[in-house]
Amino acid sequence: MNSRFTPQIVKIATIGVFIVFALCIYPVSRAHPWSDDWTYPGIYGSNWKEFFQWVVAQHVDHRIPIIKLVQYGLLKASRFDFRVLLLFNAAIATVGALALAGAARLHRGAAHWGDLVIPLTVLNFGFGLYAWAFSAQFSFCIALSFVFLFLFMKSQSANSGPLLIAAMVALWACALCGMNGAIVATVISAAILVLAIRQKAWNTQRAMIAGPASVLATTAAVFLTWQPSGTTLAAQTDPATRMLSWARHLVESSFIVDGWLQGYWRPILCAVFFGAALVRVLAYLMQALRRGNADMAKVALHATLLAYAMLFVSIVLGRSRSGEWSPGLEMHYGYLVVALVPLSWIIVTESGKKTLARWALAAVLVVAYGHAFRWGALYRLHDVRDNNAQYSNATLAIGSQEAPESLAKRKIASYFFVDTPDTQGTVAQGIAKLRQVGGPLYKTPPAASN
């Protein structure tokens, strides 16, 4: 089935997912802020000093200055229609999937129909990026690491300095996508820098030294100035059991809604698959370090998988402190480790040889994740359809004459995932701002109040 049409099939499938979202899901999605989204109307009207402090400040555990600037700019342009951010999330994820498919072609020398696993996993509608604007922290991290990988591989095959610099800029931007991006960027840049120094790359490609060093300097600043949140500092009870539960569920979280079904074949499949790829990665990187002569494009690919494996470990260690695993967390934390699936696929098929084993693996992955994609799409379509009336009412209520404090208290469940005096105050402040600067969405009073 591999042919000159295979790359086009993967591209069409990837872009097709975005088109379906734009036509069927985006128009009926939630237009008002939800939970962390309220930070955007809250900062509106601040002076430049306050705005700058907000941009660089830590949000819970994460510094996300680039995401804040991009999303705030889009919201101002759209007069705070938060569906625009969902559309942008989908676009960023699509660009990332296309970049990873391109990286697979460069690494392998040709596309493979099994590369369909890339859009089937990275673009599963079950993930939160299609429902919550602030999920950009996750979608940006994944997409920028994939864009880096493609540009880096292209720079090596074309011997292009500008492309290498562009790749390092993408990795630097990834480092500013919260602690998740900082972990991924640190592992990748450290691996490249060590092997570049080992090969004395300063004689041929100075950006191969300066780029990773700049990224590491940025992540060092992020780590050294990090202030852990209360969630991170929470005391654990029975930590070993919690961590095992998180690891067991997180490893299969790439299946999203499909993973809610009972059965152990999914975690077993993922654990064996990821483990086999990780063994290849560690063996290659250790061999490259000993020899001092490595294909840097291959180093970047292997380091990216290692980075997401390290992120997996950090999520298990960090987030298991805050509570037990519960169904639905796949949509949130699962996206941070979904990259393990396509990256493992690329690495275990990197030889380029057409074997029955590779064909069988492609069939298993495409069928399994095709089924998961179907369930994710059905879930999202039913979710926006069933909740559209509630979304519309909550959006219209913001334009009513009800006092912001009263509205925030009465309908807090429509605006925030927790109900506390602080969240009610944040929502009330945001409602007042949206009535001043929001677009037509927030100007029409609701037909009925409930």
Image: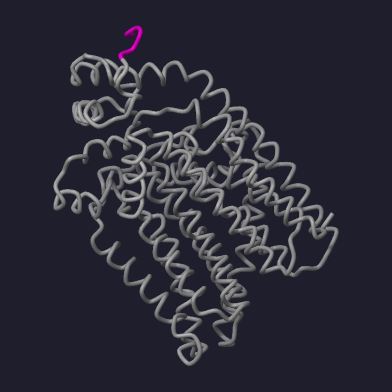
Q: From which residue to which does the magenta span run?
A: 445-450
Image quadrant occupied by the C terminus: top left
Question: Looking at the rendering, which quadrant does residue 377 occupy?
Answer: top right
User: In the image shown, does 364 or 376 lie closer to the viewer?
Assistant: 376
Q: Position of residue 389 (x, y in %)?
A: 45, 16
Check residue 171 for magenta coloring. Answer: no
Give the answer, above or below, for where 198 lies relative to 448.
below
Camera-side residue: 324 or 273? 273
Q: Name which residue lies at 45% across and 52% down.
A: 140
Vertical side of 148 occupied by 317: above or below: above
Tell me residue 133's x, y (percent).
Answer: 40, 38
Number of numbered labels in the structure image: 0
Question: Observer-nearest residue: 178 or 29?
Answer: 29
254 is higher (above) or lower (below) than 175: above
Q: Quadrant of residue 42?
A: top left
Q: Position of residue 23 (x, y in %)?
A: 58, 32
Instruction: Please name whichever residue, 275 or 391, is drawn nearer the observer in this view of the structure.
Output: 391
Residue at x 56%, y 42% (from the top left corner): 253
- Give the farthest residue toward the bottom: 203
The secondary structure that dominates the magenta segment is: loop
Residue 226: x %, y % from top left = 26, 57
Q: Is residue 32 left or right of residue 427?
A: right
Look at the image and tell me in which quarter the N terminus lies.
bottom right
For residue 225, which quarter of the picture? bottom left
Relative placement, left or right, of 282 versus 441 is right
Q: Within the magenta stretch, is there residue 446?
A: yes
Tell me how the rendering is colored. Answer: one colour
| Side of 157 where 366 appears, left or right | right
